[in-house]
């Protein structure tokens, strides 16, 4: 992929009605989940989707949530470094990878069952919503070439006035 510091498309400013609902989904999905676990999952999906913007943001947030540099650095190889991650974290990471890479056959039963052994149904719903949300953020940001550190929030100045007049 060719990278550039200039966005291909100012996606969120051109479509402010998309930013708010996607942010609301992300916030609702995070509710009652461990903040450090959330950041690990957001980092892992962002690694798989090659989203530098989200990776930068969630590594920073993971540090704030108390994650260690070692666990952040080795997250891409969590299966080999399994001793650094709890069985619950490993189950959530496996689910994140399965949903992010979603094969035609869907999420394998063994991956879902592994997550179900560690999470209540309501938490699995939250995890699935969180993984879906970060995949949406990642795909939009990569396709629009949103650079690291960009301000994503839409501005009032670019919103279309009521009635559609510009």
Image (cartoon, rainbow, N blue to C red):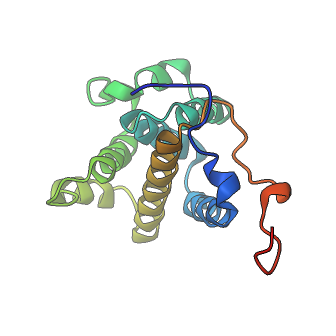
Residue toward you, 152 or 127: 152
Extreme residue in the bottom direction: 163
Q: Quadrant of the N terminus?
A: top left
Which residue does the image show at 20% across and 60% down from the upper left? 106
152 relative position to 165: left or right: left
Q: Relative to 139, is 40 above or below?
A: above
Position in image of residue 114 (x %, y %): 26, 53
Q: Relative to 86, is 74 above or below?
A: above
Residue toward you, 101 or 3: 3
Q: How many marks?
A: 0
Extreme residue in the right direction: 157
Residue toward you, 163 or 32: 163
Residue toward you, 70 or 138: 138
Position in image of residue 62 (x %, y %): 60, 34
Position in image of residue 146 (x %, y %): 59, 38
Position in image of residue 68 (x %, y %): 56, 23
Which residue does the image show at 31% across and 55% down from the upper left? 115
Which residue does the image show at 81% across and 54% down from the upper left? 155
Q: Relative to 73, is 89 above or below?
A: below
Q: Relative to 83, is 22 above or below?
A: below
């Amino acid at each position: 992929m060719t990278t550039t510091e200039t966005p291909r498309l100012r996606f969120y400013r051109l479509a402010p009605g998309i930013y708010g609902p996607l942010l609301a989904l992300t916030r609702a999905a995070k509710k009652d989940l461990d903040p450090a676990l959330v950041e690990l999952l957001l980092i892992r999906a962002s690694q798989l989707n090659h989203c530098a913007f989200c990776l930068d943001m969630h590594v920073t947030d993971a540090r704030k949530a108390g994650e260690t540099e070692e666990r952040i650095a080795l997250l891409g190889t969590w299966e080999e470094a399994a001793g650094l991650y709890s069985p619950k974290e490993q189950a959530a990471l496996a689910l994140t990878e399965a949903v992010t890479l979603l094969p035609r056959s869907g999420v394998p039963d063994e991956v879902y069952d592994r997550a179900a052994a560690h999470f209540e149904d309501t938490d699995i719903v939250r995890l699935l919503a969180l993984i879906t949300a970060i995949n949406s953020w990642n795909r939009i940001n990569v396709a629009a070439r949103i650079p690291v550190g960009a301000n994503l929030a839409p501005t009032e100045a670019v919103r279309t006035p009521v009635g559609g007049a510009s």
